[in-house]
Every structure is written in structure tokens, then in C-alpha cells.
Image (tube, helix red, strand yellow):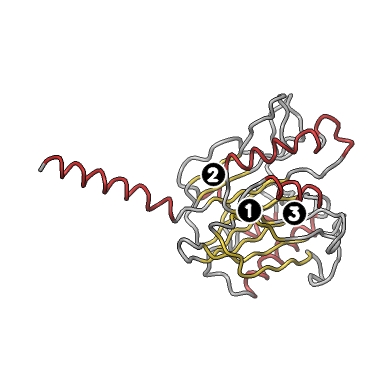
Amino acid sequence: MMSLIRFLTSLFLVCFAIVPAIGQTTTMTFNIRYDNPDDGKNAWSNRKTEVVKLIATHAPDIIGLQEALPNQVSYIHEHLDGYSFIGHGRDGVNTNSEATPIFYNNHKFELLDQKLFWLSETPEEISKGWDAALNRIALYGKFRNMETGVLLHILNTHLDHRGETARRRSAELLLDFIRKKELEGQQIVLMGDFNAIPEASSLGTLKKLLFDAREVVQQPASGPEATFNGFDTDKDPDKRIDYIFVKNLSVKTYQCIDSKRKNGLYPSDHFPIIISF
């Protein structure tokens, strides 16, 4: 009898441990630094295998990349098993321009809808907005978790590095997109390189509707707070400009990944961030 009780207790504990994992999702945002031959020892050709290895090691369900040129997207797609992706460059389809692609685990998620728009006064057209230095885009994907049937709405973006007005207006445009699609009551992840410190007005705008995952995580955040390292391994990074924002999600873990390559250099000039919810 005691053996039967022990067996049933063990079975219950195993089942109890499995249930949360079934409904758990992980998302990563990662500015991989565009393929710039002038980066020397930090050039893409020298670090691409370790970028893929880093992603594969953490195996996120959803990945938002920034500064991804077509050859970089193709390389990651070819060497990262089990993922599909959406998105194209900010200068239009079939251009050699930076993209904000969303990769997703195609064994776990089904793509239901997608939309790429420009962060400008004319979001439906290839365009540069306000005081921005460059064309900037946001990519939206609607996904269904094939295990649970739950819908997940993902936005991945890269705000301008110079235009303060552009960043603020882009934040307003992102919230406007969410409201027009009537997603306020849905599960939302907005991630990317926002080129803004936590106190910036653009982030204050986003926080009118969304929550900074680092601020609402249930367990202590791991890794450094800063996300931009500039490939400089001689000093501690001190600038946080990459974020994951959420809505209607319970954030379990938050990690800023500051691991290095075998040669002691960083995989990118930004640290990736990964959360579970």
C-alpha cells in the first residue's frame, strides 16, 4: 500500500511539474549588429556561428532580431533548425537593407497574420519619419500556440538612434496600431532596440499601455541591466536601450545574456534579452 501511495505521489508531482512548462513561452530580442566588414575582429564573418549557437542554446520560442541584413537572416535561418521567419528590409522587399525579422518555433507556433509598417507619417509606404536619420519599421505577427490554442501578438521594432521626436512619435504609432487592432485585452509582446534609456519620454509613452518585463518579472532579473556593450570588453556596459514590453502576460523570468565568444569578445554590440511567461 505504501509503495502505491509513493508511486501515485511521484506521478502527481511529475505531472504537476510538467503542466507549467506546457503553457510556458520564451521570447528573445537581439540586435545582432549589421554585417559591417569594417568591424574587423567583430565582423559578422567572425562571429556568426557563435551568434547562432547562442540562440540555439537558449532555444527561444519567438525571436525578434534587429539590424539583420538579408545575408544574416538567411544564414541564421539555414543554421537554426525548427524555425520559420517573417519580415523584410526597411527599404522594401528584395532590398539589401536592415530588417526586424521575427523567427518562431514552427513546431509550437502557427502564424496567422503578419504586417510590416513604417514608423512615419505614412506607415503604409516606404518612408522616413519626423526627424529620424533612417527609415524605421515595425513588424507584427499573430501566432497561435499549437499546444494550448492561445493567441500571441508579437511586435518587433528598432527605433531611430538620432531623432528624439521620431522615437516619441514612433511609440505613439505603435500604441495606435495596438488600439486599432483592438488588442488591448490580448497577450502582447513588444520588443526591440528602442535607442532610449529607461527615463526617456518614448518609453513613458509605451508604459501608458504596456509593462517593462524587467519591472514586472516575478523572479529577480538575471544578468546586467545594461544591454549595449559596443563590443567593448574593457569596461562594464552602462546603457540600457533594448527592451521587452508585455501586456496581459505573467513574466516568470528575465535574463540579459552577457556571455562571450570563445575568444573573449562579445557575439554582438548588444546583449540579447530573453524572458519566459
Residue 113, percent across and down? 64, 70
Q: Earlier in the sequence, mark 2 or mark 1?
A: 1
Q: Position of residue 17 (x, y in %)?
A: 35, 47
Left or right, 206 with reference to 166: left
Q: Is residue 204 above or below residue 50?
A: below
Which residue position holds label 3? 158
Q: Which residue type does callout 1 highlight?
A: Tyr
Residue 254's disc is: 2
> What amino acid type should be assigned to the residue bearing mark 3?
His
Q: Which of disc 3 and disc 1 is earlier in sequence?
A: 1
Closer to us: 212 or 126: 126
**Image coordinates for residue 231, horizontal then vertical, percent:** 76, 33
**Amino acid of disc 2:** Tyr
Q: Marks 2/1: CA distance?
A: 22 Å
User: In this view of the protein, can residue 130 be seen by the observer?
Assistant: no
**CB under 8 Å between discs 2 and 1:** no
Q: In the rendered structure, which disc, 2 or 3, sits on the residue that comes first in sequence? A: 3
Within-10-Å neighbours for mark 1: few <14, some 14–19, many 20+: many
Task: Say the numbered circle drawn on residue 83.
Answer: 1
Q: Residue at x 68, y 41 (%)?
A: 52
| Quadrant location of the N terminus in the rendered image | top left
